[in-house]
Image (cartoon, rainbow, N blue to C red):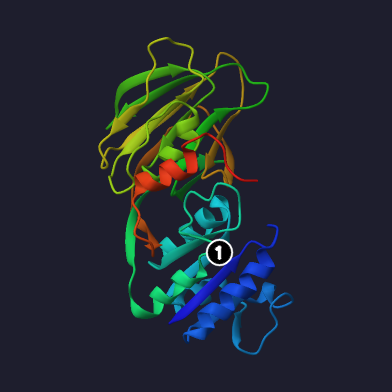
Amino acid sequence: MKIAVLPNLSRSQARHHTDRLIQRLQSFGAGIFMKSSLRHAFDRPDIMFFDDFNEMIRSCDMMIALGGDGTIIHNARHAAEFNKPILGVNVGRLGFLAELETDEFDELEKLATGDYHVEKRMMLDVHYTERGVEKTSSALNDAVISRGALAPIPDFRVALDGQTVCEYCGDGLILATPTGSTAYSLSAGGPIIDPQLACILLSPICAHSLLTRPVVFEPNAKLSVQTYFRAPSEAYLTMDGQISVRVDPKKRIEFSRSEKTAKIVRLKNHNFYDIVSQKLGDGRYET
């Protein structure tokens, strides 16, 4: 088995735990791939380094990301591009998408025996216009449309298949997948949705209405959002908290189910609600 190891070395102890992970993987014969930019930290003859990131992903059988949820989400989007499964190791705080903690590396033996399963997670395609150029990006968690820091409160018009279905006045809108239902959408009052389901969740941010509620759309819904300001202002579109662009409020932003899916490796015998209880049950997490 050829495994691409993708650590976030800005995390405390990440280098140490990556060394431990590599040793464990090599103990059952796994080949290790890493980016050439990490050679300075892991310069060993038994690791294959790649200058071309995409070639590394194409050549591997599986990816392992070490870091927080942001690291795992970032690499999961790349994994989905090449239809590769990804395993998350939590070296962050919450680690909601991580399968393993750093004291659970014994579970890695299951990769050699095939004693694991892969969850397929729905993703969103987001179509938008940036500086006159039409673009498409994918999101595993969510896409957020928001106003600038000093912009007036805008109105948002949401259309389904070209017909207006709801309007909001507030700070922004979150379009989330079931995976993203436990992220920003949850903080904005959205429901928790089992990630094995397929749907598109719309959650308003600080909406100025007593009757405003999140809305769940069927997975193949074609949604679009237009933003209206009462004075010239800026609107921003952010995907997975990592890709942020300034968009023309007059242009429609379209959302639809992506043909790509994120494949999340599961080694342990637990379900989604075990994770929810463990990570979110008492409102606290380790720092």
Task: Between residue 175 and residue 277, name the one nearer to us.
Answer: 277
Q: Secondary structure at mark 1?
A: loop
Residue 270: x %, y % from top left: 35, 54
**Residue drawn at x 48%, y 83% as measured from the top left:** 30
* Residue sticking out furthest to the top: 210
Q: Taking 34 as reference, is 89 above or below it?
A: above
Side (left or right) of 268 relative to 283:
left
Q: Taking 103 as reference, is 132 above or below it?
A: above
Residue 199: x %, y % from top left: 29, 40
Side (left or right) of 130 relative to 117:
right
**Residue drawn at x 56%, y 51% as measured from the top left:** 70
Query: Residue under circle 1?
Result: 103
Residue 237: x %, y % from top left: 53, 37
**Residue drawn at x 43%, y 49% as measured from the top left:** 140
The amino acid beneath tag 1 is: Asp
Residue 124 seen anywhere in this rendered image of the structure: no
